[in-house]
Amino acid sequence: MKTNTHVKKGDEVTVISGNHKGKSGKVLSINTAKNQVIVEGVRKMKKAVKPTQQGEEGGIQELDGPIHISNVKKA
């Protein structure tokens, strides 16, 4: 079942509450089941990654973390 949200993938949004208030960026993805969005450049998280056999190096990778959809508005 698909639910309607006030933002879509690719929209420019601004964070209106929380620790990242005032930051803005483009919506990369939306998780309607958890009511979360991932905004480019907001809520950076670090994740440890193991090396793989395909030659990719391991290390610490920076990813964009999810924000609740109620904390963003269209810019």
Image (cartoon, rainbow, N blue to C red):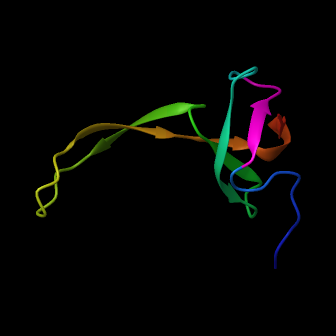
Magenta residue span: 11-18
**Quadrant housing the N terminus:** bottom right
Magenta span includes 13 = yes
Q: Is residue 10 above or below residue 43?
A: below
Name the foreground residue: 40 vs 69. 40
Residue that appears at 66% across and 42% down: 26
Q: In the drawing, does residue 26 fall left or right of residue 41?
A: right
* Residue at image location 82% in from the left, 34% down from the top: 75
Position of residue 52 measured from the top left corner of the image (x, y, whole percent): 16, 58
Task: Tell me if residue 40 is in the magenta stretch.
Answer: no
Q: Is residue 19 above or below residue 15?
A: above
Place residue 4 in its image quadrant.
bottom right
Give the total of numbered labels. 0
Q: Residue at x 51, y 31 (%)?
A: 44
Residue 69 position (above or below residue 31): above
Q: Position of residue 6 (x, y in %)?
A: 89, 52
**Residue at screen point 85% across, 42% down:** 70
Q: Is residue 66 above or below residue 71?
A: below
Relative to 60, 5 lies left or right:
right
| Residue 20 locus on image (x, y percent) | 68, 23
Question: Which residue is more in the foreground, 46 or 4?
Answer: 4
